[in-house]
Image (cartoon, rainbow, N blue to C red):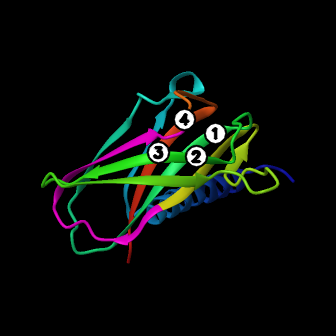
Amino acid sequence: MKKTKENTGNMKYKSFVFTISVIFLLTACNKNRVFHRFTDIPGNKWLSKNIVHYDVPITDTASSHNVYILIRNNANYKYSNLYLFVTITSPAGFSVRDTVELTLADKKGRWLGKGAADLYTSRHPYKMNIRFPYRGIYTFDIEQALWETELKNISGVGLQIERLQ
């Protein structure tokens, strides 16, 4: 088939429409996302003294939200789970501290997160269907709670908050 100006123009138009569609889909999927951050762990060694800290601005006190903890580990992580201490402090100064267990692998040792090569990212429900009672900055402090002071093969920790419809 011989390329003509008409075919080239048609291809450019289709490419443009496809690009706009992808951008629209990506932004539409994220309209309920209130917060999403990932913190890299230096050297893939999460020290017990290194607390991952997030300041989260909350403006919607009427809607319910889901809060997720995100973990990125590599295939050499030697446990199937991870214990965390999570402290939430409200703008009014009230704090709640939880001990959380996250399951990273099933009983056969298969990683539950999505992976590429030897890196796996998993999303774990933390607080579901909750309402934030105050507008302002909520702080989330996440620290590893295993008995090892240097937890190897954890490469990232994140927090994601979504507004429910």
Instruction: Classify mark 3: helix, strand or loop.
Output: strand
Q: Which residues are magenta?
A: 126-146
Task: Determine which residue is flagged by label 1.
Answer: 73
| Name of the residue lying farthest toward the right | 1
Give the number of the disc on residue 82.
2
Q: Amino acid at mark 1?
A: Asn
- Which marked residue is nearer to the observer: mark 2 or mark 4? 4
Image quarter of the N terminus? bottom right
Magenta residue check for 165: no
Instruction: Name the N-terminal-most of marks 2 and 4.
Output: 2
Mark 3 Cα within 10 Å, few/some/many (few <14, many 20+)? Answer: many
Q: Residue at x 70, y 55 (%)?
A: 112
Q: Amino acid at mark 3?
A: Gly
- Residue 125 in the image, given as x and y percentages of width and height: 50, 62
Instruction: Name the N-terminal-most of marks 1 and 3.
Output: 1
Instruction: Name the N-terminal-most of marks 4 and 3.
Output: 4
Query: Is 162 situated above or below 92?
Result: below
Instruction: Classify mark 1: helix, strand or loop.
Output: strand
- Residue 84 in the image, given as x and y percentages of width and height: 48, 46
Task: Determine which residue is flagged by label 3.
Answer: 158
